[in-house]
Each structure stands twice: as structure tokens, then as C-alpha cells.
Amino acid sequence: MLKVTDEDIEWAETLGEIFCLTFLKGVDETEALSRLGALPDTLRHRTLEEAQEVYDCYEAGYTDFASAIDLGAWTVLVEPMGFQGAMNEQLTALSRGTEVVSVLRHDYADHGFCYAVDGMLVTGFEPTWPEHRWGSEPDRLLGKMRAAGLDPDAEDDGEDDGDFVPGAYMPALLLAGLITGALPHPDTLDGRLLTAAIEPWFSAAPPPPTVGPAADTMLQAIGAAPPHLLRSVAARETMRLAAVLDLDGTPDLAEAVAAAERGEPVTVSPGSELGTHVRSWLARSRQAGQSLNDPAARHHMSDDERSAAHMLGWFTEALRAALWHEPRAAARGALRPLTAGPPLLRDPAQETAILETLRADPA
């Protein structure tokens, strides 16, 4: 077992108020980045400062970046200002066929710790409250947690006193070192690291769970409908959204949606013609949202342009869901703009028609 002390992880403080470190066992740097959704044409060596400059840039679309460091038996992905490695959907793809340990610092939300094996979360908890754990084996790491200074036996008095611990991610990082036997050397972070722009849309992770469709009647209909009807309505609704946004003429879009409707596996590569359009839509959507918090770029978009860009974000989420292989998840995601989206994307007559289709006798 690696002997880890607080001094061994002091370098983590330099990564800022938000960062994610994700350790993958037996996976090399390029493959680790690919699993996270790396765009191949952006793969090159950069310093963390160079990557940060692109992340902060309106013209570059506020691109998320991750860097990979070879630790021998493990590779660690470093996401300054990022958190993809802590997302349940990404952990599914990252840990397939191996083990993954993820540590998240997020001073404006929650810190996080996750240990996953072969696509399944084994143990997860918020380091501030290690007594609350979840996963398939929430008690798997109890001994190492105690060794790292995390008290899994702390008593909950039932009161939410708001005792968020700003530095709680540090013992979680110690725990990661105890599990992996490997931590980055601080000097490594000062050099040029293998780095890539990250776009989860192109990863093998399942689409994120949606909060919609909002209507209970639609949820019930989706839950009871057979797979072929679910794929059909997901495809139909995706192409309706494309027509509303004047995107239905996008090369290869209709063909990809039709293939998914037939139950065929569909992969859109980042370098394909459709993939290039998707990347453009995603970048435009990020510009619309993040420029609101960027004083230097806030006025780069008019209100109409920002509204149109937000619509692209809704569409790309629906498209990714529609192309997913699991019919129920595909329908839920593709129908979300219809039932819970902005007025431009909603259509009561279409919603009624889809409900009738889903309730039809499968025979």
C-alpha cells in the first residue's frame, strides 16, 4: 500500500476551486482520454495554463479540456474546472473492463468520491459526509477510509447544519492514493501533458438522465410501450425538432436517425460531416450560456442569437438520446423538449399524437 501523507497532495490546491482527478487502472493515456470523450483532432501536449486559456475563450467555444498522466499501472485524468470524471454516466464508460477512482473538488456545489468497477459504481460518497455512502458495496472501502482520515462512522444528528467542509476533498484524494498506490508528482503538472478537448456527446457513456418528460401521462406511456414504438416516436420527434430549427437538411442527420429507428447501432464520429455539425451546435450552445458570466464576451451575442443557440443545446441532447441503443432512454430524452422544453419546441398536437401512438395496441 502506498504511504501517503498530506504533504504528498498539497499540489492539488493549485488546481483551483473546481477540479476532478480520475484514475483508471491498466488504461493508457490516449485511451483514457478517449473514454472521457476526447476529440481526436485536438489531442496534443499542452501545459495546464494553455488548456485553461482555451477553456476561458469565447471564440474557442469555452471548450472543456482534460490532461492525462501516466502513473505506471494507472493513468490519471486531470480536469481543472471540470467534473466529467465524477458523473455517473461517464463512470460507466470509463470503468468498463477496469477500475476507476474519481475525486471531485467543487467549492460551489458538492465534493465527490467514486470507486467504480466494470461499469458499476461500487462506492460513492460526498467527502464532507462520509457516513452517507451508496453504490453496490457502500462499505467496501471502510478500512482505507479510516486510514485516510475519513470517518465512515460519524453520527448524523438529523439536522442540516450546513457544515460543508471546504477541504474535505483532500482526505478523499488520500483515499485515492491508498487505493491506486499512485499519485502524480507535483513537478509533472508543471510540464506539457497529453491533453484533448472533451465532448461527452461523442463518448460511450449513456446519455444523462432527463428530468422530463414532465407529464406523468407521457412517462406512463413510455413505460408501457414496446421498443419499436419507442424508437419510432424518438425518431419522429427528433426530426420534427430538426425541422423547427431548420436543421433537417444537415448531411447524414436523417440517415442516422432512421438507422436508430430500425434498431441499428449508430456511431457519430467527431470528424464526420454530421459530427462536425454537432460540435458546432454544442460550441454555440456553450457560448450562449457561459458568455453570460464572461464580462468580456457577454455582448458578443444578441438576445435572438443567444435564444437560437440555446435551442441548439436542446436539440443536440435530444439527438444523442434518439441515437442511443436503449429504446426507453431514447424516447425519454428525445421527447423531453416536447414536454418540458421552451415554447418554440413544444407542440400540443404532436404531444397528443405521440401519446396515441405509444398507447396503440402493439399487435
Image: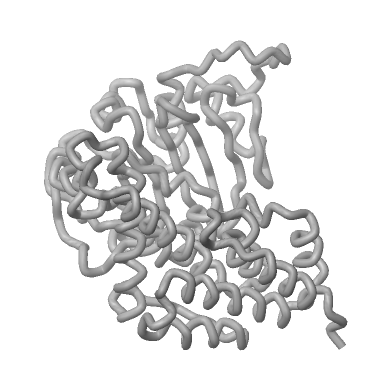
> Could you say where residue 203 lies in the image, as x and y percent from the top left?
42, 65
Q: In the image, what residue occupies the spot 55% across and 30% down?
A: 126
Give the left or right position of residue 102, taking residue 355 as reference: left
Q: In the image, what residue occupies the spot 43% across and 36% down?
A: 104
Q: Is residue 75 visible?
A: no
Q: Is residue 334 above or below residue 25?
A: below
Q: Nearer the viewer, residue 262 or 44?
A: 262
In which quadrant of the rendered image does the N terminus lie?
A: top left
In which quadrant of the rendered image does the C terminus lie?
A: bottom right
> Could you say where residue 73 lies in the image, as x and y percent from the top left?
36, 53
Q: In the image, what residue occupies the spot 41% across and 62% down?
A: 312
Give the left or right position of residue 156, taking residue 286 as reference: right
Give the left or right position of residue 164, taking residue 54 as reference: right
Q: Is residue 138 visible?
A: yes
Give the left or right position of residue 33, taking residue 210 as reference: left
Q: Nearer the viewer, residue 214 or 195?
A: 214
> Could you say where residue 80 lies in the image, as x and y percent from the top left?
29, 40
